[in-house]
Amino acid sequence: MYRQLQQIIKDIQNSIQFSGTVLVAEGDNRLNESFGYANRSEQIANNLSTRFGIASGCKLFTAIAICQLVEKGQLSFQTKLSDCLQYDFLTFDSEITIHHLLTHTSGIPDYFDEEVMTDFEELWVANPMYHMRNLSDFLPLFQHQPMKYRAGEKFHYNNAGYILLGLIVEHSAGMSFADYVQAFIFDKAGMSESGYFALDALPSNTALGYIDQPDGTWKTNIYSVPVKGGSDGGAFVTVEDMKKLWDALMNYQLLTENSTNTLLSPHVQVNEDGYYGYGVWIKKRNDTILKYHIMGYDPGVSFHSAYYPKLSSGVVVCSNKSQGAFDLMRGIEGYLIEKLGK
């Protein structure tokens, strides 16, 4: 059934030297392929059980955590940031709400603003990445900077907003963000191989991230990203675990049906057919939902994953290189859309 798709994946892999693992699941039909090395020095191959960093792909986990706390009555989406945290945010708009933070419409400054800075590695010249182990460690990078926009004025993708959401989870739940996600998302979804692992203490079968240089040399990303991920990105998952996350979310195992629908609602329009919900991108086609999708990019990391409701199909593409996941995702999606049109 997937012979054509296998050839599409193989052709793309040959053209870009993709390194990582791909999973396409539709009902009982599954296709998975792995390419390249999790560890180039030791020539350890990537496989179906390899853990990969997913960068911003895990903003969805943060949004789910917030929705769970709203269900428990500990927060509301209209709760103001100033009522959640006691940190000094003197330059921030007093009207910023959790909804604003979830939808990237808060207008706050970002610690990595892609309009100003093109290279994520630049951040760690003045702020050593090995100090970035707790969410509060990120606050000095943005908490005293001026607002970029008025709260609610426009969509502007913002990592700092999700750092604040993680701090709100910690304050409301009385535990570290990583421990909360482990207990109330990973464990509930059966994601037994996933976690927020420190780069200097990675578990077995975890892919190292690789940065390829123009001259043909390469280096790992150990000095290019924070030593431990948090609520704006940096968890590690397997492709199987990511599929379990979509299944648990769509089957209301993590949130009630009402809360799930709220999370998956197109709260803000980003472009002609693209929207953002809570921690998830949404693409429409002919006024219906084509896909819910998440993505993440860091030096040495590229990740795309999507759920296509009309096909009940899930796709996960994890790569331990800075580029490549988008190319595979585009090829797979082209195949699925063609099938949808038949």
Image (tube, helix red, strand yellow):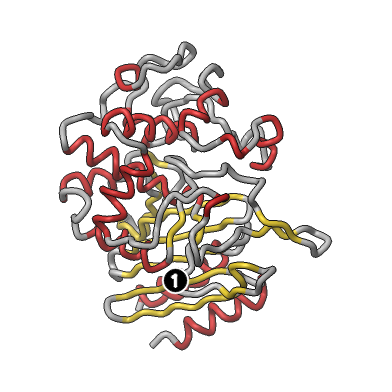
Residue occupying the point 62% across, 67% down: 39
Tell me which corner region of the image, top left, top right, bottom left or bottom right, holds residue 301: bottom right
Q: Kindly state the secondary structure of the residue where label 1 is placed.
A: loop
76 versus 338 height, above or below: above
User: Which residue is farthest right?
Assistant: 215
Q: Which residue is mark 1?
A: 49
117 versus 90 height, above or below: below
User: Where, quadrant-wise, is the C terminus in this rendering?
Assistant: bottom left
Residue 229 makes an appearance in the image: yes
**Residue type (three-letter) at the residue carrying disc 1:** Ser
Residue 158 makes an appearance in the image: no
User: Which residue is farthest top?
Assistant: 90
Where is residue 328? Give x, y as percent: 54, 69
The answer to whether residue 88 is left or right of residue 199 is left
Residue occupying the point 42% across, 75% down: 338
Where is residue 29? Give x, y as percent: 32, 81
Tell me which corner region of the image, top left, top right, bottom left or bottom right, holds residue 15: bottom right
Where is residue 275? Give x, y as percent: 39, 46
User: Where, quadrant-wise, is the N terminus in this rendering?
Assistant: bottom left
Circle 1 Cα neighbour tier, 10 Å, few/some/many (<14 / 14–19 / ≥20): some
The answer to whether residue 247 is left or right of residue 158 is left
Tell me which corner region of the image, top left, top right, bottom left or bottom right, holds residue 193: bottom left
Residue occupying the point 80% across, 59% down: 214
136 versus 187 height, above or below: above
